[in-house]
């Protein structure tokens, strides 16, 4: 279980949010909503262990989640605004890099986002929606219990949103958790909303 207790975060000289508490259980999903600048991406970066909280604690199964950054990194997949692709590598090679880190089958991951016909193209020539699909295909590699997704559906066509919905459902059915920041509809049935 993931538990946030009284979290506060500052960027520059400004407090972005404070007094933030929530819990997320296995199979659960939390939608982060709020106006531009409310702190959704900041919270996801904090939960990913990339920013330190100014106050408060983040607990994983009752223990300080951030005490061991490597252990925390191993339990999550963080998809930021950036697709984090190597432009000169093909779609298949980009996924193979992450498969070496996390395990999992590259072919299955390509297929999960409908990328098999594009597998041999260098990432630099993919359209913006295709690049997003390739970034999301990482979720279909070796499993991790906590998915942190920043605007995952930006640029996606309807079929790709449906495919992402399938990945999200399978992840939750296997006990996984999802935290997603979005301004767009996201296929996450039963998700609770956390307004920042
Ligand atoms: N590196 C930084 N230095 C200083 N301030 C920052 C930095 N990054 C973000 N901020 C500020 O922190 C606040 C929260 O930004 P954040 O990106 O978390 O918002 P958001 O809710 O994700 O917004 P959006 O809906 O536009 O994606 C904003 O006021 C932003 O200007």
Image (cartoon, grey):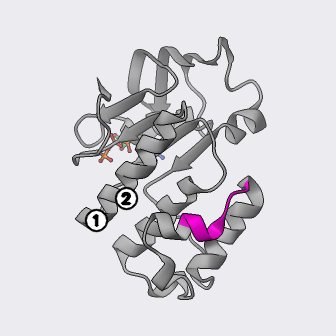
Query: In the visual, does 120 lie left or right of 186?
Result: right
Give x and y (percent) for residue 135.
50, 63
Image quarter for ligand 1 equals top left
The secondary structure type at the circle numbered 2 is: helix
**Residue 183 occupies quadrant:** top left
- The residue positioned 51% from the left and 62% from the top of the image is 137
Q: Quadrant of the N terminus?
A: top right
On screen, residue 57 above or below 104: above
Pick whichever, 153 or 34, lies toward us. Answer: 153
Residue 81 in view (yes/no): yes
Residue 156 in view (yes/no): no
- The residue positioned 40% from the left and 30% from the top of the image is 29
Crowdedness of circle 2 by 10 Å Cα count: few (<14), some, many (20+)? some
Labels 2 & 1 near each other (Cβ < 8 A): yes
Pick whichever, 18 or 62, lies toward us. Answer: 62
Give x and y (percent) for residue 189.
29, 34
On screen, residue 9 above or below 146: above
Residue 12 colored in magenta in the image: no
Q: Which residues are magenta?
A: 103-109
The secondary structure type at the circle numbered 1 is: helix
Give x and y (percent) for residue 45.
52, 40
Give x and y (percent) for residue 150.
41, 48
**Residue 133 occupies quadrant:** bottom left
Query: In the visual, does 152 lie left or right of 34?
Result: right
Crowdedness of circle 1 by 10 Å Cα count: few (<14), some, many (20+)? few
Q: Quadrant of the C terminus?
A: top left
The answer for how far apart the CA atoms under marks 2 and 1 are is: 6 Å
Marker disc for residue 163: 2
- The residue positioned 32% from the left and 39% from the top of the image is 188
Q: Which residue is mark 1?
A: 159
Q: Is mark 2 within 8 Å of ligand 1?
A: no
């Amino acid at each position: 279980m993931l538990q946030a207790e009284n979290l506060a975060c500052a960027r520059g000289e400004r407090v972005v949010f404070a007094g933030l508490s929530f819990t997320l259980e296995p199979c659960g999903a939390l939608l982060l909503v709020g106006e531009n600048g409310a702190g959704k991406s900041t919270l996801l970066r904090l939960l990913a262990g990339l920013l330190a909280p100014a106050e408060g604690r983040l607990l994983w199964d009752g223990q300080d989640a951030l005490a061991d950054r490597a252990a925390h990194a191993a339990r999550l997949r963080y998809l930021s605004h950036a697709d984090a692709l190597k432009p000169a590598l093909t779609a298949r090679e980009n996924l193979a890099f992450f498969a070496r880190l996390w395990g999992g089958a590259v072919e299955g991951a390509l297929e999960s986002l409908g990328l098999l016909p594009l597998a041999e193209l260098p990432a630099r020539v993919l359209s913006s929606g295709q690049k997003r699909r390739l970034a999301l295909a990482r979720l279909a590699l070796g499993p991790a219990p906590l998915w942190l997704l920043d605007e995952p559906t930006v640029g996606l066509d309807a079929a790709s949103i449906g495919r992402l919905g399938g990945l999200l459902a399978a992840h939750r059915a296997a006990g996984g958790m999802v935290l997603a920041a979005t301004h767009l509809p996201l296929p996450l049935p039963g998700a609770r909303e956390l307004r920042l």
